[in-house]
Amino acid sequence: MRTLIVLCAGQQMRMQCPLYLNHYSCNVLLAAKVLENIHADTYDRIIYTVSQEDCEKYDARNILQDGMKDVYPIQIFTLAQSTSGPAQSLYLTIKGMNVAGEIAVRDCTSSFCLAENARGNFVAGVDLVRLDRDVYRVRQKSFIVVNEQGQILDIVEKSFRSDIISAGLYGFENAEDFVMAYERLSDWHHPIKHLYISNIISYLIGYRQLVFHFAEATGYEDWKDPDAWSRLQDKQGQGKLVMVDLDGTLFDTRQVNYMAYREALERHGFQLDYEYYCEHCNGKYYMDFLPQITTQDELILHQIHMEKKAAYKKYLGCAVLNKTLIDMLRLMGREYREALVTTASKENTDDILNYFGMSNIFDLILTREDTEHVKPNPECFIKAMAHFSALPENCIIFEDSEEGIEAARRAGVQCCVVKGYR
Amino acid sequence: MWTKALSGHSGCQVLLCESDARLFVRKISGSSDYNARLQVQAEKQARFESRFVSVPKVLDSGITNDGCYYFDMEYIRGVTLAEYMRRIEIGKIRGFVSRLIGHIVDVGNKSGYIKADVFSDKINALRQSFAALEADASVDMQLINRALAALEAHSWQSFTQSSCHGDLTLENIIVHDSELYFIDFLDSFYDCWILDISTLLQDAYALWAYRNWDIVDMNTQIRLAVFRDILMDELTAIDAGVWVNEVFYALLLKLLRIYPYTKDEKTIRFLNDKTALVLLILEQGGL
């Protein structure tokens, strides 16, 4: 049993409510955002620890349950009283929720990405030398001393000892190790107040000689940093939105889609010519072109489409990224929210974004499954604008297909037409 | 000769000296009355032998123009273990504790007999000293009387005569190149290895060496907790743990002996807190 415990108690306030109850982009709760890119799906149980006060004053329990309902099933543990620090909050959670076995503890003040799924005893940390930005109030962080083999030799609070700071995720192979150390450090003989999780780990390394591994975190974003926070708020407040099509705009996927359709169609005894595909089919919803070249039988058409989606992954190496557009999005991202709005299926959209390591760059992704109508119907664009409360005059659309350009016109949004970029 | 005054204790003056481009430390008796005690310390340091720790070499000794005894010793360019505990890599504490215990137990084996009335005489003398402190509101006399009663009721038979440092606080251990050096040996009213362990615990449990720090930061506290727990484990491993309670009695006696020499209220309050803690441990039957 692996349990992930997210500590939300004792957080800073933002916008008149606790930090973790604020929203990141595309209405993602910060409390949910902290689970992204840390392999949260590999945990059997996820517990959020909140204070009774937050539940009463800010409706924390309901907001968390609502905000997490489409993300992961979670349990909520309520702290009846404020605690002396994170270690006590964790201790009470372990005892109160009967947690045993392997645990990881996540704080709720930052986001980052773990390339590998860390297990057992570990601490996720950020190498300041490799980080491309300054860290806010760096002296307030926990510093980790790591040897060449990636083993943690020491972890200290608020004292410069190394170039590596804790990112806010700690793993214990056995919850009992944490419990033992906490009880020893806080008993009546020599109570140490305001214990941090790092203090417990330091004790376990020194006294029990447990081995803790270093897990490198990248893309660290500290929400306690007022500058980072105000940048986020500015972006959210301006109501500016750029919407980008996927096939033919962000990626040249003609080859990928053609190969996938050809493979699926051949299984059903149909042939597909590449030039014909490029001229009449590319960028269109399958029901708008497959019936003309195959059959009217919707069951067979659906089957072909499913097989095409499955084959899509195999040919992703043929896709070409529109690097110019990516550069433009990077610049526009300082002022605009960014949405990917596509007729492609969610499965294929996720496939190609993951393949190119771009799953995090958009604030919103709308795929075929999110709308009733397909382009040139403007429903998808209107839905994206409504999501960010953006007016058409504050938006820009990047499109390549006639259907997409027409949908942009009907939505009343200026359209930049992508004419090819190979 | 260039000299710089260093902080000294026990009524001695301590100077860092440079002569012929060589640094050394000179320890001078505060008055001729203290000469004999300082000479015993110098001899203790000169005779010192250990497989686990070192001492600064005694280089010279003599009498000043004022008739005060002095001795010169090698200067060890390091920091005290009390200071070093702030930033020691946590995994290295075990090695340090093992060396300290290794040395203390090693010399403790060369044991002899301590007269039974040594302790009862000292406790009686303490009771009289406290009678003079009864007017001092900062001294918790109820606590002191409980502590004295506990000391009087204790049998001190297991305390046997053996070599020891005499004042082994973390401030009297210098760390240099990962080596431990003992300084400031002291003659106590009894010499027993348990005294040195109790002095280490006085710092690890009662934070005596840190009493004048504004804040003992969390990292230092965690390191002291690791030091303390490893020390207690090592102590418990000796003779099936029979010494654990004895060490706490020795610590209680040490704390009470500090009161009569204490002038400031802050230290008195500190002693009250720590005496209460140790007494509670003993009253509850140990750890």
Image (tube, helix red, strand yellow):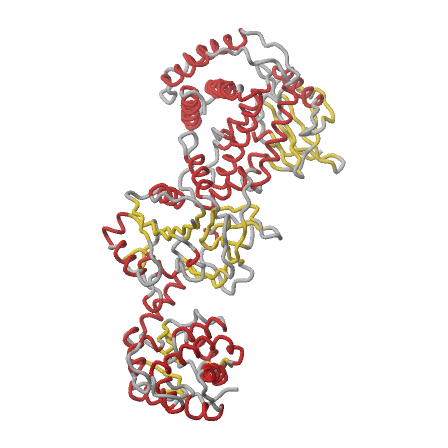
Viewer can see residue B258: no
Using the image as rendered, state which of residue B244 and residue A76 is in the foreground. A76
Q: Residue at x 38, y 67 (%)?
A: A231
Instruction: Using the image, determine if residue B162 lies above or below residue B81.
Output: above
Instruction: Using the image, determine if residue B60 lies above or below residue B153.
Output: below
- Spot occupied by residue B17 in the image (x, y as percentages of width and height): 68, 33
Q: Dividing the picture into quarters, in which one does residue A417 lie?
A: bottom left
- Spot occupied by residue A43 in the image (x, y as percentages of width and height): 42, 54
Asked whether, in this view, residue A230 is left or right of residue B18, the answer is left
- The extreme front residue here reads A269
- The extreme left residue here reads A56
Using the image as rendered, state which of residue A55 and residue A225 is in the foreground. A55
Using the image as rendered, state which of residue A172 and residue B70 is in the foreground. A172
- Spot occupied by residue A261 in the image (x, y as percentages of width and height): 45, 83
Asked whether, in this view, residue B26 is left or right of residue B283, the answer is right
Using the image as rendered, state which of residue A276 and residue A242 is in the foreground. A276
- Spot occupied by residue B106 in the image (x, y as percentages of width and height): 65, 22
Q: Residue at x 52, y 35 (%)?
A: B226
Viewer can see residue B178: yes
Instruction: Using the image, determine if residue A125 lies above or below residue B121.
Output: below
Asked whether, in this view, residue A382 is left or right of residue A222, the answer is left
Q: Dividing the picture into quarters, in which one does residue A209 lie?
A: top right
Instruction: Using the image, determine if residue B160 lies above or below residue A63.
Output: above
Total number of numbered discs in the rendering? 0
